[in-house]
Every structure is written in structure tokens, then in C-alpha cells.
Amino acid sequence: MNDLSDEYIRQSLKNWAARHTPPSAERAHLLLMASSYQNSRQEAPLSRKERYEYIAPLRHECLKTERSLESITQTRIWWFFNTPLRNMA
Amino acid sequence: MTLASDKELVLQLQSGCLEALGFLYDRHRNSVYRTALAITGDGDAASDLLQDVFLRLYRFACRIDPQRPLEPWLYRMTTNLSYTWVKRNHRWLRPLEDLMDWISGGDENHPYAQAELHDDWHHVQQAVSALPLQQRIVVVLYYLNDLSLQEISEILEVPVGTVKSRLHYGRNALKKSVGLHKELVPDLSYERS
């Protein structure tokens, strides 16, 4: 049998919980971790620190590519604004 | 979303199908996240635990019996990991974190947080957070997830009598904290119809 206080507690908790949803990025992160595990067939690291260290090299690779592209772009922009071409544009 | 049952998805997961993990995640993420959040009271921890639960589901899929419902396995993993997290998280750190929040203004100035502070829901959740951990877990599983005493007993691997006892003390503490009137609360028979 449920009494009033049971219902009150139940509804309050449910209403409070309904306001909270997991961050949307978590799904992609989970699938990335799972696919890394699937590819490596090693023990997937589970602690937050381990997970960061596991993901960090991947991020580093991406950043390296982005940075190299960025430097080329910046050099071209610098060259454009510091040569007579600027006056011709 | 998919119309495939949990059983079919677990079978796919056992053959290494990542898509099945995504579908199971979409289906159960809210209940796992909210259970972890209600037990730990920490959003970041709940996100981490959500990841851990589903990573373990993926890693140990071959150990799961597809003939049995998946929810009890998920709840067991969530409560176990939440229990470990709370035990590891030093209690003396919390007052320091609260102090830092107070100094920095915290999130309490946010209109959303202000609205929540004035809700009854928030008071009940605060009261649940203040319960001893074992009572809190039983209260969350019983009230938030609508599990029966028998189901909770199987998830926590403790006798039904122990679940009843924890629920009884947890409920009484909640009544006191939230200020429910005695006349509204007759002696309790726990079995739900």
C-alpha cells in the first residue's frame, strides 16, 4: 500500500530527476572508447585519469594536424598583408 | 531509435556490434544517469559513472544472459560503481568545495538554480542526499526507479528483510527532514500493488 508521503517522496524525486539529463557529448565519447577497445582488444581504461590519458594521444594527433594547417594559413595571410599584393587587391 | 528488444541488442553486442551499444545507451542512459546522480549528488561523477556502466556492458557483454532482463544488471552496476565512488570521495572535501562555491558565487545565482532551490523536489533530493549511503541506495531504487523490494534485494544481493529495514529507516529520516505530517503517514506496509 502506498500512502500520501510515499507518493509525495516518489513524485518529488521523479520531478527532480526529470530535470537532469546526461550531457549529449557522452554518447560519442562512449562509442569512441568502445571502438578503441574493440580495435585494440586491450583492457579499456576506466578511471577518469586513465580515460584522459587514453584519449589524449588521439587528441594530440588531431591538434598536430590542425596546428600545421593553421601555421600555413597564417603564413599566407601574413605574406598577403605584408607585400605589395595588398595594394593591388 | 530501434524497435529491437534489449535481448536482441545484447545478442548483437555479444558479436561486437557497436551500433547495438549506442541503441542500448539511448534507451537506458537517463535511468542510469539519474540513479547515479541521486546516489552521488554530483553531476560530473554521474556522467563518469554512466560511461563506466556502458563500457562495462560492452566489455562484459559475453557474460550477460540475454534471456534475462537487462535493467537489473544496469542497476546493479550503477549502484556498485556509485557506492565505490561515494566511499572513495573524501567527505571532508565537500565542505571545502561548498566554501569555494560560496566564494565564487557558485551556480546558485543562476535563475534555473534559484527556481530549483525553492522547489519541494529540491528539498526531498537534499534529504535523500543526507541519508546514510546504504539507505540512500534503497530509497533511490524504490522511489525513483519503482523497483519492488524483491528486485532491490536481488540487485543488491541482500535479504529482503534488510531492504525493508533500510527503507524503513530511510523513509523515517526523509519524513523528518522534509517535515511530512505524522497524520499523513500511517504505519507502512511496503508491498506495492
Image (cartoon, coloured by chain):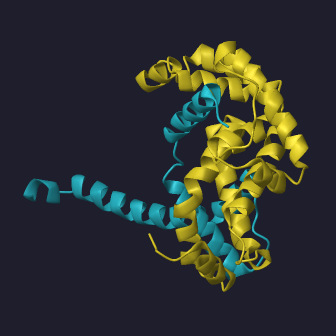
Q: Residue at x 67, y 50 (%)?
A: B48
Image mark count: 0
Q: Nearer the viewer, residue B2 or B21?
A: B2
Chain for colour cyan: A
* Outermost left residue: A88
Rendered position, B152 above or below B140: below
User: Residue B189 appears in which quarter of the rendering?
Assistant: top right
* Side of B77 relative to B22 (left or right): right
Rendered position, A2 above or below B56: above
Q: Is the N terminus of chain B in the top left, top right, bottom left or bottom right quadrant?
A: bottom left
Q: Residue at x 35, y 57 (%)?
A: A74
Q: Can I make out residue B179 in this image?
A: no
Residue B179, how many percent across, how many down? Answer: 66, 13
Residue A28, how many percent across, how many down? Answer: 52, 63
Rendered position, A59 above or below A40: above
Q: Residue at x 57, y 63 (%)?
A: B25
User: Residue B60 appears in which quarter of the rendering?
Assistant: bottom right
Residue B141, how many percent across, how many down? Answer: 71, 45
Residue B138, how many percent across, how many down? Answer: 77, 41
Q: Residue at x 23, y 52 (%)?
A: A81
Chain for colour yellow: B
Q: Can I make out residue B117 in this image?
A: yes
Q: Nearer the viewer, residue B43 or A83?
A: B43
Q: Nearer the viewer, residue A11 or A30?
A: A11
